[in-house]
Amino acid sequence: MTGEFSEKVDIEVTVNGEPVEARVPAGRHLVDFLRLDLGLTGAHASCEHGVCGACTLRVDGEAVRGCLMLAAQADGADVWTIEGLTDQGACTDLQRAFVARNALQCGFCTPGMIVAANDLLNRGGIPTRAQIREHLSGNYCRCTGYEAIVDAVESVARARAQDGKGARAGEGAA
Ligand code: FES
Ligand code: FES
């Protein structure tokens, strides 16, 4: 768990479409707030230094490292975790593709990987494999070959383009 300052801060934040009011330690990181205070454990805290990507969230439409943002900084923000995106069906195709292509083993990196990949695909078009690699270069996986992950993301990009669905449910909200 990341360190905290003891001073408390009141925040109002929207999490997965629901308004949340909370009093949080000023130094509490957003990923810890979500995991420990709200029980949303999909985003993982691993390196806690912005390196591994396991804590990736969607904040005000952007992929964000939950370990580099304070909960206090999220005051007024629109925050989506893998749980909310899953409920919205915003990344169902990616999740299925990861399973179908064996793009996960232990699954620890997978929520962050999916949120980051969804961020790329929501921009529309079909990214090249190099662009997929570049976009996911901040998301580490210690057990699956990256090739399968890139395969999964590429297949979904092509499928979305074919369906004329560059954006999925929840994209507008998330
Ligand atoms: S835990 Fe946030 S980047 Fe590793
Ligand atoms: S599937 Fe284990 S770290 Fe990626």
Image: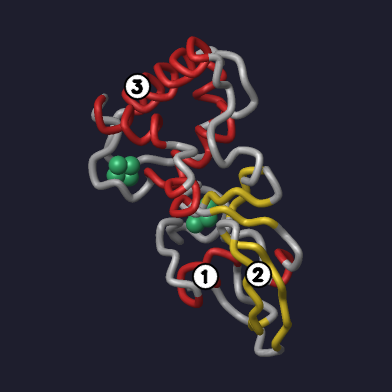
* Nearer to us in this view, 108 or 167: 167
Q: Is mark 1 within 8 Å of ligand 1?
A: no
Left/right of residue 111 with respect to residue 21 in the rendered view: left
Q: Earlier in the sequence, mark 3 or mark 1?
A: 1
Q: Earlier in the sequence, mark 3 or mark 2?
A: 2
Q: Is mark 3 within 8 Å of ligand 2?
A: no
| Residue 162 x %, y % | 49, 10
Real-space CA distance between mark 1 and mark 2, rounded to the nearest whole angstrom: 8 Å
Real-space CA distance between mark 3 and mark 1, rounded to the nearest whole angstrom: 31 Å
| Residue 64 x %, y % | 62, 49
Q: Residue at x 37, y 23 (%)?
A: 152
Left/right of residue 9 with respect to residue 151 in the rendered view: right
Q: Amino acid at mark 2?
A: Ala
Real-space CA distance between mark 3 and mark 2, rounded to the nearest whole angstrom: 34 Å
Residue 89 lies in what quarter of the image?
Answer: top left
Q: Which residue is mark 1?
A: 32
- Structural crowding at the residue carrying mark 1, measured as other residues with C-alpha within 10 Å and reported as few (<14), some (14–19) or many (≥20): many
Q: Amino acid at mark 3?
A: Glu
| Residue 112 x %, y % | 46, 46
Element type where label 2 sits in the image? loop
- Structural crowding at the residue carrying mark 2, measured as other residues with C-alpha within 10 Å and reported as few (<14), some (14–19) or many (≥20): many
Number of callouts = 3
Say above or below: 92 vs 6.
above
Q: Which residue is mark 3?
A: 147
* Nearer to us in this view, 170 or 109: 170
Element type where label 1 sits in the image? helix
Picture quadrant of ligand 2 = top left
Q: Which residue is mark 2?
A: 71
Q: Earlier in the sequence, mark 1 or mark 2?
A: 1
Element type where label 3 sits in the image? helix
Q: Can you see residue 52?
A: no
